[in-house]
Image: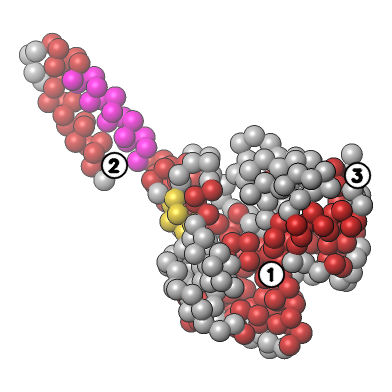
Amino acid sequence: MLIIIAALLAWSGLRAWRTSNPFIKWGGGGLAAFFSTATALISVIAIVGLFKVHARSAPAPDLKVAGTPKQIQRGKAISDGFCSACHSKTGTLTGGLDLGEHFPMPVGSFVSSNLTPAGQLNSWSDGDIFRAIRNSVDRDGRWLVMMSYTNAGKLSDDDIRSVTAYIRSLPAAGKPTGNPPDRLNLLGIVMLGVGMLPEGKPVSTGIVKAPLAGPTLQYGEYILSYQDCRACHGANLTGGAPGQLGPLGPDLNLVKGWKLEDFVATMRTGVDPNGHELGKDMPWRPIGRMSDEELRAVYEYLTHLPG
């Protein structure tokens, strides 16, 4: 449609240029030429953006998850402490949260999917689910935009299998959500075309392993590799920077001045040791559902940040 509009404007400008009235010739022709050029430029940028939308691809591994009680228990822990922040608005993993409403600009709709058997995953293979979590590509090969902006792909292979096992164990609940879940509007496609929207985390086909679970700095580093703290608090957790996609978060070196029990209480109540309530964009509720051991591991990592 943009191309048609540009062509019509160019045709109008040509017609205006052929008239004998100098006002119409120079004024109308000039305006038509300007808007035609601008529309044509936007068309080219939109085409680049559409190419980027469809460029992401990744293979779906051939696997079958056993679904052992241990896997289901671990998958539930990850879901409660991570996935639920987006996918449990009205019920356990029933989706329905439009994350596009929290963007600084209206670039589209990004509704979290219903992950129970009432949603699309009921017809997906275990390999399809693995690919969606690791590389943000759905069963039909479409780019899961919002997933690609998260660090879900940093989950270890075993943890992704555990999440899959837990999803498979859930009863059907909630209402079906849209397919595809992410819909960029024209502004979003244009911004993607000029590089103002990120193209998501790189596709990975390697094996990801987690360190031994425990209240250690190393395990805390692993937890924060897939938790999306850096989207708000910066790549080095030293505070967000203007222009980033997520809200501006403070320097997490501040945790060095807290005791372990202060940190755990903050994550479970939403109130820091100074009595300040955490911002509404801080997903402290799902983080607070992590076990004492996991929260201590995160605390160990944060209190050993450089600087």
Between 149 and 289, the residue placed more toward the observer is 289
57 relative to 303 in the view: left or right? left
Q: CA distance from mark 3 to mark 1?
A: 28 Å
251 or 184, which is in the foreground?
A: 251
**Which quadrant of the view contains residue 61?**
bottom right
Q: Residue at x 49, y 60 (%)?
A: 111
Segment tinted magenta in the rendering: 28-43
Q: Position of residue 232 (x, y in %)?
A: 68, 46
| Residue 140 in the image, given as x and y percentages of width and height | 46, 71
What residue would you read off at disc 2? 2
Q: Are marks 3 and 1 in contact (CB under 8 Å)?
A: no
Q: Residue at x 35, y 41 (%)?
A: 43
Residue identifier under label 3: 257
Q: Identify the image quadrant of residue 74.
A: bottom right
Q: Secondary structure at mark 2?
A: helix
Task: Give the residue number, with chain letter if any, for mark 1.
Answer: 80
